[in-house]
Image: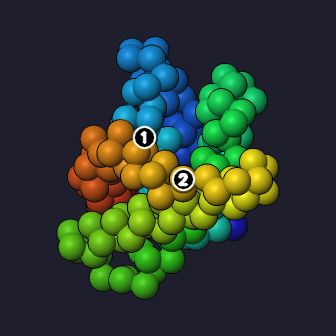
């Protein structure tokens, strides 16, 4: 990792801890599930600094938030951790795969990273249900519920992440 990557990852990790707290202060914990503010810094880290940095922010942001603010709740933390790791990894992989930076490719990168993250989340729910509960957990229904609850955040990500990526790339 370069100094730029470490610094950017640290700043985005901090944003991933602090921005959700602003949402929680304004509208309670339900706003986190609705607007998904921790996902944006993770997606940006992967796209700007690569899959390793994206995965690192995907680990650091929820872990620090959990340790400092007890958010996400302990029962949700491991599932969210895996989801965010895959968000960061996928954003970095897809950004590099598309290489040509234009609006469509940035939108596709964000969309594909969202899909990979949600699939990882579903897989963790299914596996967690099998291992911890011992019964079939309705992973599909749970993921569909989280997608419908998080639809405003998903749309915000599709608009904000490509725009922020483009703006930050120009600043370099």
Q: Quadrant of residue 125?
A: bottom right
Residue on which the image places disc 2: 138
- Of tags 1 and 2, which is closer to the observer? 2
- Secondary element type, mark 2: loop
Q: Quadrant of the N terminus?
A: bottom right
Above or below — where is 49 with respect to 154?
below
User: What distance separates the C-alpha of mark 1 from that of mark 2?
Assistant: 22 Å
How many numbered marks, from 0 up? Answer: 2
Residue on which the image places disc 1: 36
How was the colour assigned to the protein in this rendering? rainbow
Q: Residue 98: horizontal and vertical position, in percent? A: 36, 83
Q: Nearer the viewer, residue 151 or 159?
A: 151
Q: Is residue 158 visible?
A: yes
Residue at the location (43% across, 25% down)? Answer: 30
Q: Quadrant of residue 50?
A: bottom right
- Secondary element type, mark 1: loop
Above or below — where is 149 with respect to 101?
above
Mark 1: give few (<14), some (14-19) or many (20+) Cα within 10 Å: many
Q: Earlier in the sequence, mark 1 or mark 2?
A: 1
- Position of 23 with respect to 60 (left or right) is left
Q: Residue furthest left?
A: 103
Q: Residue 137: horizontal and vertical position, in percent? A: 61, 52
Above or below — where is 34 with respect to 13?
above
Q: Residue 128: horizontal and vertical position, in percent? A: 71, 54
């Amino acid at each position: 990792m370069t100094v730029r990557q470490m610094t950017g990852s640290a700043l985005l990790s901090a944003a991933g801890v602090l921005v959700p707290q602003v949402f929680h202060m304004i509208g309670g914990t339900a706003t986190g599930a609705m607007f998904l503010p921790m996902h944006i810094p993770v997606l940006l880290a992967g796209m700007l600094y690569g899959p390793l940095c994206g995965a690192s922010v995907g680990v650091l942001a929820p872990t620090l938030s959990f340790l400092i603010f007890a958010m996400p709740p302990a029962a949700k933390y491991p599932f969210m951790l895996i989801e965010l790791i895959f968000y960061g990894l996928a954003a970095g992989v897809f950004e590099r795969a598309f290489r040509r930076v234009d609006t469509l490719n940035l939108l596709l990168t964000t969309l594909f990273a969202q899909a990979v993250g949600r699939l990882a989340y579903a897989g963790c729910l299914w596996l967690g249900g099998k291992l911890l509960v011992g019964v079939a957990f309705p992973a599909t229904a749970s993921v569909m519920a989280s997608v419908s609850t998080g639809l405003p955040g998903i749309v915000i990500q599709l608009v904000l992440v490509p725009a922020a990526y483009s703006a930050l790339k120009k600043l370099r």
